[in-house]
């Protein structure tokens, strides 16, 4: 497909640039304002993946981006705004996705005609509608309209560079009569590389050294930005040199391998395993790195370490002691930390790891399965081949106790979009075909977006979906119970018959679940949907630990 | 539940006001920021209807509002923005829905905590997040935050009055710690009634009379605003007095009964039945009333009557001859029209109605069913008991030829949201329980939102869904064909087994379809899903009439 540089169309220039940055797939929903772009994708090395809705396609792109470093989704104009929730989540959770939208042709705007999918029925002739762009302005870091062959190349490079540098969504709109126009001035200028200057930050690291040299039991609390910005190596270089234990947040689970000798557990206040909570809360210096510290991450603000947080660094701010450090971005900060010189390594002991080591689960034949036994059984079989993705609710809280390798856990624990799990599992399986994705999803979430299993079927993707069926919005019941927390009970294991493929299993005992799960692990090529019927009030150990704090 | 006025909470004041305005149901998805509101609804005379997603719940509320005059949907904060597409559609198609959103408590904002579902991770302490409200500002005519017991009552009345007067969505946000606070100053002031003043519009009607007295063959082209603003009576009074034939737009289909002696068909340019097109385009004066004139309404701008449009009146503008009439709203305009005095009635003849009269369909046993035969068969059995709702695509174009009573057709022919049909059918069935809703849906659209049939099941709603399966995005194929127009082929008739109820039927011949459809019509209490497998390129007569114009 690669033609000479002179002949490239605006559409192909965009696709070539995405491909050059490593993108292999674009998720999308076709529509008449975007068909010519869809056609170009079909003819390109990048593969087009049809989703079953815009929002769900956005979730697939989000999970894909978290694993590969870049995702993209292609929508039509107007009704494409259905995707805003997925894009907002990608923004707040730092997932670099490119939203490509078709639009009416510039010629169609020329005489002020009233077009379908448009918001304003009264256009001034020749004036482009801004409705959709104005909405995406709120949840993307850059917005460009490729309506001019002279500027398209530079605008594409600008938007994609920002997406990759800031790990946030960008929005690219292409009027349909511009897609095939050749770019007239392919810029010779290389896109700006965001190089990290030699920041005058010596003082900042001196302050850190001073703080650390005065303490005995420091702990690092690592968050998801470590993974997004690719600085796990720097984190480990620092921690290993001085023997500083690392706990992760829930959002940051698996920023380092959970089998690493310095890993001490997932810390989330009162929701932590007791030994982890006790260990962390005895520290005399907390380094919070790449971590937002939301309600969900702090066990609904039960993390009892406010006074010990002496160093806090993430993209939005760096605070050392009482000093805000300006103009030092997160990546050079982490690079500086890796080179920090302290007086000597630390020597404090770790919690006994029994709490979060494999539970040596043994199925009791005929025993009705519980939520905690489900997680124990899953944990027993996890290897470096597996990626676990969860939806929102107790499937997320329960999964905190699983033991996983680096970069093997995906959740949306901050924006908390119910329904992320199934599309996320499909997107993740596409991103990492040689590994196996295990999606852990509650029934409430499943009913939102389960149809994306159709996409798994279409493209022979084979995630394993473990459907924790607690008969409604389980985590809301302790908050305020009512019929609105109930959902319609489906015959979930019949779903493959409806969709025309995949394996559906219903397991009600410990041995049935173990058998179904190991069978699913051993067979590739089709999605597996394993329903685990649970009691309405069977909560995960983590949620039970939070106990009465969940009430308000 | 009615307590003394003094003790009413903010939440109940809102519900009482909605109930007083005729609302019987609120659609919604629960979430922790809105649970206390959900609880109040559960305890109120208004019934809470759980949907399977926010956007789909918005579609249900939209269809409900089109039939009853008011709809409402209750969402949680942040992730609730998933509903924006449905709200945008309700805006541009003038459907009065109230979006009620929960929100973090004012107390939670107090110290700048980072909360799940929120967009901004850095709040200034005490400052409410505006992210969601700013988005809804773009697609609602009023936005209020009920954070103050002293202003809540008046803000509720203001928002609901605007919703009802302007027939557009409004947005009401309630911080969760304000829901149960008693309103402190229940306003004694009656809400403003939008009375229509005696507009100084005599001149406008003199101009209309002059134009009409000089012509011989006037035709009224009536659009959806006639139904939304409840002025069909005025339209008919005027048309009947002077014997002026009425055609409707596609959006305005059934603003009057299609069996009314003055009704002359659905006019949509080259997509019209030939006799209707010929009749309309010989007119010497067109009155365009309550009609936007979008691409879809004008047969992609093939309506050949530009010079004959001498009178154009709708909410956004009134133009008589070359004069823009200011300050005369649409309702008083229609009231004035009803009282207009002309010299004498008109006498021009109508098209022979055979084109759009019942086709006397007779099923040929064993004959593979086609799209046009499907519509003929449906038309044969339509009575005043039926409401037809369609999705977007050829199901909509084909349905134009059906013959229906007044206010019996629902479509989203302007904003054109793929997936509106199934949720719309469920919402419509709830709004009009004594009638029977027939949803006509393409397979592409069905895959977007079919799960809303679960809601039909839960609340014993029994729409009949006719699934026109042409194996993908059929109306896109003539535009630009590609694999992106294909979708995964499901075993649609297995869906009831998956959901646990309803009747699923697959019909491939004319007699099978007639038998399945009449069976469905005769049995109430469960939804019926009738799949009609069609050829990929079997287009409706209307789309064929548009012919090569569909290409671009």
Image (tube, coloured by chain):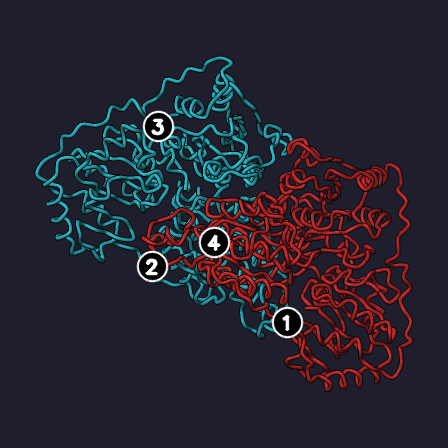
Chain colours: A red, B cyan
Q: Residue lying farthest top?
A: B365
Element assignment for label 3: loop
Separation of disc 3 and disc 1 at Cα? 64 Å
Label 3 or label 1, whichever lies nearer to me, is 1
Label 4 or label 1, whichever lies nearer to me, is 1
Whichever of labels 4 and 2 marks the residue nearer the N terminus, that label is: 4
Which residue is denoted by mark 2 in the rendering? B190
Whichever of labels 3 and 2 marks the residue nearer the N terminus, that label is: 2
Q: State the mark number for residue A194.
A: 1
B344 in relation to B129, above or below: above
Q: State the mark number for residue B403.
A: 3
Judging depth in this view, the residue of A452 and B106 nearest the camera is A452
Judging depth in this view, the residue of A445 and A174 nearest the camera is A174
Element assignment for label 1: loop
Tell me which chain the residue with mark 2 is part of.
Answer: B
A270 in relation to A200, above or below: above
Contact flag, marks 4 and 1 (Cβ < 8 Å): no
Query: Residue, x 49% and y 32% (percent of image)?
Result: B463
Separation of disc 1 and disc 2 at Cα? 61 Å
Tell me which chain the residue with mark 3 is part of.
Answer: B
Query: Residue, x 38% and y 60% (percent of image)?
Result: B158
Which residue is denoted by mark 4 in the rendering? B99
Query: Residue, x 42% and y 29% (percent of image)?
Result: B540
Judging depth in this view, the residue of B133 and B32 nearest the camera is B133
Tell me which chain the residue with mark 1 is part of.
Answer: A
Label 4 or label 2, whichever lies nearer to me, is 4
Contact flag, marks 3 and 4 (Cβ < 8 Å): no
Contact flag, marks 1 and 2 (Cβ < 8 Å): no
């Amino acid at each position: 497909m690669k033609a000479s540089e002179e002949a490239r169309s605006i559409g192909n220039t965009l696709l070539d640039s995405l491909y050059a940055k490593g993108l292999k797939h674009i998720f999308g929903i076709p529509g008449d304002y975007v068909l010519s772009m869809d056609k170009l994708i079909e003819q390109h090395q990048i593969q087009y993946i049809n989703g079953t809705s815009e929002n769900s396609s956005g979730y697939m792109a989000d999970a894909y981006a978290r694993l590969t470093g870049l995702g993209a989704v292609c929508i039509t104009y107007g009704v494409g705004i259905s995707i805003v929730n997925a894009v907002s989540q990608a923004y707040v959770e730092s997932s670099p996705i490119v939203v490509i939208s078709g639009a009416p042709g510039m010629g169609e705007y020329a005489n002020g005609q009233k077009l379908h999918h448009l918001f304003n029925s009264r256009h001034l002739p020749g004036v482009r509608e801004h409705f959709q762009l104005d909405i995406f302005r709120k949840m993307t870091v850059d917005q460009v309209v490729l309506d001019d062959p002279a500027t398209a190349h530079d605008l594409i490079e600008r938007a994609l560079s920002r997406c990759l540098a800031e790990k946030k969504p960008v929005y690219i709109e292409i009027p349909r009569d511009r897609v095939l126009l050749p770019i007239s001035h392919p810029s010779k200028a290389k896109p700006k590389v965001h190089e990290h200057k030699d920041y005058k930050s010596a003082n900042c690291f001196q302050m850190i050294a001073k703080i650390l040299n005065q303490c005995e039991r420091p702990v690092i609390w690592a968050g998801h930005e470590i993974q997004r910005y690719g600085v796990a190596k720097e984190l480990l270089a620092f921690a290993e040199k001085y023997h500083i234990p690392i706990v992760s947040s829930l959002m940051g689970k698996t920023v380092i391998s959970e089998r690493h000798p310095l890993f001490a557990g997932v810390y989330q206040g009162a929701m932590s395993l007791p030994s982890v909570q006790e260990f962390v809360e005895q520290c005399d210096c907390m380094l919070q790195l790449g971590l937002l510290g939301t309600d969900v991450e702090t066990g609904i603000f039960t993390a009892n370490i406010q006074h010990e947080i002496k160093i806090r660094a993430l993209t939005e701010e760096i605070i050392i002691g009482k000093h805000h450090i300006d103009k030092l971005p997160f990546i050079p900060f982490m690079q500086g930390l890796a080179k920090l010189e302290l007086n000597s390594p630390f020597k404090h002991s770790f919690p006994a790891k029994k709490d979060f080591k494999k539970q040596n689960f043994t199925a009791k034949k005929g025993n009705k399965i519980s939520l905690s036994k489900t997680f124990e059984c899953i944990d027993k079989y996890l290897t470096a081949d597996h990626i676990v993705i969860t939806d929102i609710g107790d499937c997320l809280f329960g999964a905190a106790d699983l033991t996983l390798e680096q970069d093997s856990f995906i959740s949306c624990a901050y924006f908390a979009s119910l329904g992320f799990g199934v599309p996320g599992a499909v997107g993740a399986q596409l991103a990492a075909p040689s590994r196996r994705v295990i999606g852990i999803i509650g029934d409430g979430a499943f009913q939102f977006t389960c149809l994306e299993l159709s996409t798994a079927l279409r493209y022979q993707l084979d995630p394993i979906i473990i459907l924790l069926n607690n008969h409604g919005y389980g985590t809301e019941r302790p908050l305020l119970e009512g019929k609105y927390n109930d959902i319609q009970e489906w015959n979930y294991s019949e779903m493959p018959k409806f969709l025309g493929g995949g394996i559906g299993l219903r397991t009600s005992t410990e041995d049935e679940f173990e058998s179904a799960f190991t069978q699913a692990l051993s067979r590739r090529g089709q999605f597996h949907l394993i329903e685990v019927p649970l009691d309405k009030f069977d909560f995960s150990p983590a949620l039970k630990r939070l106990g009465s704090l969940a009430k308000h």
